[in-house]
C-alpha cells in the first residue's frame, strides 16, 4: 500500500478512536469513573503530551537537538502567553519571528 | 422568587443570552486558529482532503496538531495515532462531567454529541450557572456546533494557503507549531505539580530524541503523567482541568 493510502488509514483510525473516546464518556455509568486517581492521571497526560510535543517541535530536528530561530520564536510566544495574548496572535507572531530571523540569515 | 411574574420568554432570553454570546465568541476565536492547523498539516505532507478529513473526524485541536506534528517529525502512523488518541482521552472525561447536563440522550443524538464534546463546548457549558440546565445545554450545543463549522471551514483555508507557500520553514511554520503546543498547554500549567510534569516530560523527550524512533519521546511522557497522578497531592487545587 502506498504512503498516501497509509495516511488515510491512519487518519481514519485516529478519527474513530477520538470519537470512541468521546462517546465512551457519554455512556459509562458515572460511578465507574468517580476514581480520583484516573481523573488526575488523565489531566496530567494532557499536560505531559502537550509539553513533550512542544519540546520536540521547538528544540529538535530529526534525531538531533537543535538551537535555531525556533528558540527565539517560542521565547517570544511565552512572553505573549504570559501577557495573555490570544492564541492566534501567539502563533502568528512566533511564525513571523522565525521567518524574520531566517530572512536575516540566522537559524 | 424575586421576580415571580415576569414574561417567561423575556426571562428565558435574558438567561440564555450570555451562553450564546460566549459560544459565539469562543467559536470565532477557536475557528481562527484552524488556519494554522490547516497550513501545518499540509506542510507535514497531508493533502488538502486528508487535512479536512482529519479535522472533521478527529475534531479536537490538540490531537490534530499532535497527529501532524508527529508525522512532520518523521514519526510513523502508529505513533501519530497513539499520540492523538492519548491526547484525546480528556474528552472522554468531559462526557462524564457533562452527564447531569446532557443525559438522557437517544442513540443518534449521543453520537453527534460525542463528536462535539471538546475543550471549548465543555468549558462554555460548565461556565453557565449550575442550576440552569437549559443555559448549560445552549452553551454546549452552540459552542460545539459553532466550533465544528468554523474550525473545519477555516482548516480548508489554511490547507489551501499552506499548499502554496513552498518551504514551510521560510514562513516560520515549524515555530508556529511549537508555539501552538505551548499555547495549548499554557492554561494547564497553573499548579506546581503540572509544571513539574511538564518540565520532566520535556527533559525526557529531549533525552529520548537521539536514541528512539520519532514519536516515542512524546508517548513516553505519558509514563510521567501516570507517576504524577498516582498519589493525591496535599493541596486541593493541584490537578489541572
Image (cartoon, rainbow, N blue to C red):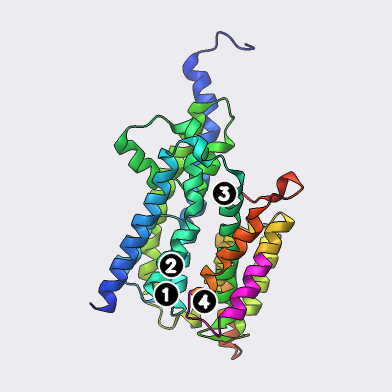
Local SS, label 4: helix
Residue under pointer 2 = B67
Q: Residue at x 52, y 41 (%)?
A: A33
Q: CA distance from mark 1 to mark 4?
A: 13 Å
| Residue at point 45%, 55% (across, down) | B60
Image check: A46 left or right of B189?
Answer: left
Q: CA distance from mark 1 to mark 2?
A: 6 Å
Q: Which residues are magenta?
A: B198-215
Residue indicated by mark 4: B174
Q: Nearer the viewer, residue A24 or A64?
A: A24
**Mark 4 or mark 3, which is nearer to you?**
3
Label 2 neighbour load within 10 Å: few <14, some 14-19, many 20+: many
Q: Nearer the viewer, residue B49 or B171?
A: B49
Are circles 1 and 4 on residues that touch, CB within 8 Å? no
Q: Is residue B34 visible?
A: no
Q: Residue at x 50, y 19 (%)?
A: B10
Residue under numbered circle 3: A38
Residue pointed to by mark 1:
B71
Residue B193: x and y in percent read 71, 57
Placement of the N terminus of chain A among the 4 image quadrants: bottom left
Label 1 crowding class (10 Å Cα cut-off): few <14, some 14-19, many 20+?
many
Residue located farthest toward the left when viewing the structure as drawn: A1
C-alpha gap between disc 4 and disc 3: 34 Å
Quadrant for the C terminus of chain A in the image: bottom right
Q: Position of residue B70 (x, y in %)?
A: 46, 73
- Tell me the SS state at disc 1: helix
- By secondary structure, the bulk of the magenta-drawn segment is best described as helix
Amino acid at each position: 500500500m502506498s504512503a498516501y493510502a497509509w495516511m488515510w488509514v491512519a487518519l481514519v483510525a485516529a478519527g474513530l478512536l477520538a470519537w470512541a473516546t468521546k462517546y465512551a464518556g457519554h455512556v459509562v455509568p458515572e460511578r465507574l469513573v468517580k476514581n480520583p486517581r484516573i481523573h488526575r492521571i488523565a489531566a496530567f497526560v494532557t499536560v505531559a503530551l502537550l509539553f513533550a510535543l512542544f519540546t520536540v517541535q521547538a528544540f529538535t530536528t530529526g534525531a538531533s537537538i537543535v538551537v535555531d530561530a525556533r528558540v527565539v520564536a517560542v521565547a517570544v510566544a511565552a512572553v505573549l502567553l504570559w501577557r495573555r495574548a490570544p492564541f492566534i496572535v501567539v502563533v502568528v507572531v512566533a511564525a513571523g519571528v522565525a521567518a524574520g530571523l531566517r530572512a536575516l540569515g540566522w537559524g | 422568587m424575586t421576580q415571580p411574574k415576569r414574561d417567561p420568554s423575556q426571562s428565558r432570553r435574558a438567561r440564555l443570552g450570555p451562553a450564546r454570546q460566549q459560544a459565539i465568541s469562543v467559536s470565532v476565536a477557536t475557528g481562527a486558529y484552524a488556519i494554522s492547523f490547516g497550513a501545518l498539516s499540509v506542510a507535514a505532507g497531508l493533502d488538502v482532503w486528508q487535512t479536512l478529513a482529519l479535522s472533521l473526524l478527529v475534531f479536537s485541536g490538540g490531537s490534530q496538531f499532535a497527529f501532524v506534528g508527529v508525522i512532520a517529525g518523521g514519526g510513523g502512523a502508529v505513533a501519530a495515532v497513539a499520540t492523538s488518541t492519548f491526547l484525546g482521552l480528556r474528552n472522554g472525561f468531559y462526557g462524564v462531567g457533562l452527564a447531569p447536563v446532557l443525559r438522557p440522550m437517544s442513540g443518534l443524538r449521543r453520537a453527534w454529541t460525542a463528536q462535539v464534546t471538546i475543550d471549548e463546548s465543555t468549558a462554555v457549558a460548565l461556565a453557565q450557572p449550575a442550576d440552569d440546565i437549559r443555559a448549560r445545554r445552549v452553551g454546549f450545543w452552540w459552542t460545539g456546533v459553532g466550533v465544528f463549522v468554523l474550525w473545519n471551514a477555516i482548516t480548508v483555508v489554511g490547507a489551501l494557503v499552506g499548499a502554496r507557500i513552498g518551504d514551510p520553514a521560510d514562513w516560520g511554520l515549524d515555530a508556529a507549531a511549537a508555539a501552538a503546543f505551548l499555547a495549548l498547554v499554557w492554561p494547564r500549567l497553573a499548579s506546581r505539580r503540572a509544571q513539574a510534569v511538564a518540565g520532566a516530560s520535556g527533559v525526557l523527550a529531549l533525552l529520548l530524541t537521539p536514541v528512539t524512533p520519532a514519536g516515542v519521546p512524546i508517548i513516553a511522557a505519558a509514563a510521567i503523567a501516570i507517576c504524577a497522578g498516582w498519589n493525591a497531592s496535599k493541596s486541593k487545587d493541584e490537578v489541572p482541568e
